[in-house]
Image: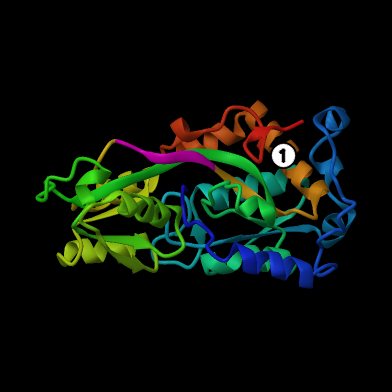
Amino acid sequence: MTKRLYVAIVGAIVVSALAGGCGRSSSGTDAGESTAAAAGKTAKDMVPEAVRAAGVLRVATSEGYPPMEMYKKGTQELTGVDPDLGAAIAAKLGLKFSITNAAFDGLIPGLQGGRWDVVMSSMSDTQERRAAVDFVDYFNAGGAIMVKKGNPDGVAKLDDLCGKTVVLAKGSSNLAIGEKQNEKCATKMTIMQSEDAPTGLLSIDSGRAVATIVDYPVAVMYAKDTGRYDVLPEQYEAGPWGIAVDKRNGALRDAVAKAMQELQADGGYAKVLDSYGVKANAVDGVLVNTQPWK
């Protein structure tokens, strides 16, 4: 998503320094391959030996942002765009697929500590995060304002939130959008922080807050499923979300990029997105750190 800006990036860099050699992270010499070098290889050919030997792609996510990551109704089985696309990538890599639910602010430290191989959790590809990880981008979206059905407070744009109580998810880039806007407000907002989007919506239901900002595809799904909210059409700070790979593991990053290339070519990527109604949020081509993979 323009989701959940990782506010402890400095801590993640410290973890990186302390965790050298842990898990399956490779050394700084593991620069990966260019698209030219990878042209004659499959994604399966490009899997680093340590990951190939383990036989499994360990993915971490943070549940609570349907349609991106959520539990199947009545179960603890993770589903959504991220788990489904992760499984498709693992298949291209010739690996079994394992997915773990974890707190969002622990995803990058866990990645650097070797607890998992990649993170897929609607994570915005930002320059700050790129100090610690590389991203293979797979989705493009921004934050949208959500209000109570009927929009009783007449909110039309970010400026209209000045002087009002707004609830925003901790550590999110949507929180950053609200805080940035608040700097411009003559009459400041009261910003409440929730653990996640669903918890924030409860504050709107109870009248404690008049609005929130949620990643657009997620907002649309919540509004459709509940019938209790309106989603304003403008998207703020729209940008790519990426699959995070430890910066020391360029070979795995490029294997994942190659898997994305294969899934784009055979329609598997579009099929996953289309099954959740978010095909319009697809990225064009294979992007690493927002740039064409090369």
x then y, percent, for residue 153? 11, 50
Where, by quadrant of the figure, is residue 12 drawn? bottom right
Q: How many marks?
A: 1
Residue 237 higher or lower than 54, as above or below: above
Image quadrant where residue 141 sits: top left
Indicate the secondary structure of the residue bearing disc 1.
helix
Q: Residue type at mark 1: give it.
A: Ala
Q: How is the image coloured?
A: rainbow
Q: Nearer the viewer, residue 181 or 40?
A: 181
For image coordinates 79% across by 39% down, the residue present is: 43
Q: Does residue 272 show up?
A: yes
Query: Which residue in the protein does label 1 denote?
Result: 257
Residue 80 picture location, percent across and down: 48, 51
Residue 279 appears at what percent x and percent y?
47, 33
Residue at 61%, 47% in the rendered image: 127
- Which residue in the rendered view is the most extreme toward the bottom? 18
Let me know if residue 100 appears in the view.
no
Q: Quadrant of residue 287?
A: top right
Please give left or right for residue 138 compared with residue 73 in the image: right
Residue that appears at 51% across and 47% down: 81
Location of the C terminus (image quadrant)? top right
Q: Which residues are magenta?
A: 234-240
Please state the horizontal and vertical placement of residue 202, each as a whole percent of the image: 24, 65
Task: Give the residue at x 22% y 51%.
Answer: 161
